Amino acid sequence: MKIRTLVKLALQAIRKNKMRATLTMLGIIIGVAAVIVMVAIGSGARARIRSQINNLGTNMIVITTSPRSAPRRST
């Protein structure tokens, strides 16, 4: 099919199903906005954590745990 025919057919479908087209566009807009907000929140959190780590300085004590061995059973 030609592009012109496809565009004409798509526009006719949108005109016939206005509510469906509106809800579809609304869903796409909300989805894109949600992704943008989540990326922004992630970037802001990453920047805040990095600044807090940088503010700790170099005189820091690191504490780590050693792996525990399985408890022994007596028979």
Image (cartoon, rainbow, N blue to C red):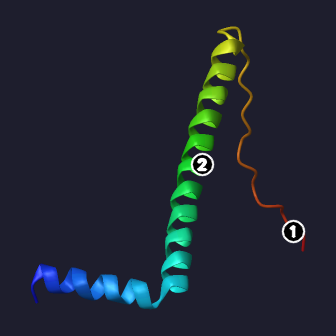
Of the 4 image quadrants, the one containing the N terminus is: bottom left
Q: Residues within 10 Å of mark 1 (few under 14, many from 20)?
A: few
Q: Nearer the viewer, residue 33 or 61?
A: 33
Name the amino acid type tagged 1.
Arg
Task: Give above or below for 32 relative to 28.
Answer: above
Which badge, 1 or 2, comes first in the chain's sequence?
Answer: 2
Task: Give above or below for 30 relative to 18.
Answer: above
Picture residue at 53% right of the left edge, 76% below the top: 22
Q: Are marks 1 and 2 in contact (CB under 8 Å)?
A: no
Q: Position of residue 19 (x, y in %)?
A: 55, 84
Q: Position of residue 30 (x, y in %)?
A: 58, 63
Picture residue at 59% right of the left edge, 57% below the top: 34
Count of numbered badges drawn on the protein:
2
Labelled disc at residue 35: none
Question: As drawn, which residue projects farthest toward the left?
Answer: 2
Q: Position of residue 46 (x, y in %)?
A: 60, 34
Secondary structure state at the residue bearing disc 2: helix
Task: Give above or below for 74 relative to 36.
Answer: below
Instruction: Return the residue at label 2.
Output: 37
Instruction: Return the residue at label 1.
Output: 73
Of the 4 image quadrants, the one containing the C terminus is: bottom right
Q: Nearer the viewer, residue 57 or 49?
A: 49
Give the quarter of the image for residue 47.
top right
Q: Position of residue 10 (x, y in %)?
A: 30, 84
Secondary structure state at the residue bearing disc 1: loop
Could you tell whether 45 is left or right of 73 in the image?
left
Q: Nearer the viewer, residue 22 or 24?
A: 22
Task: Give above or below for 61 relative to 31.
Answer: above
Q: Residues within 10 Å of mark 2 (few under 14, many from 20)?
A: few
Q: Nearer the viewer, residue 45 or 10?
A: 10
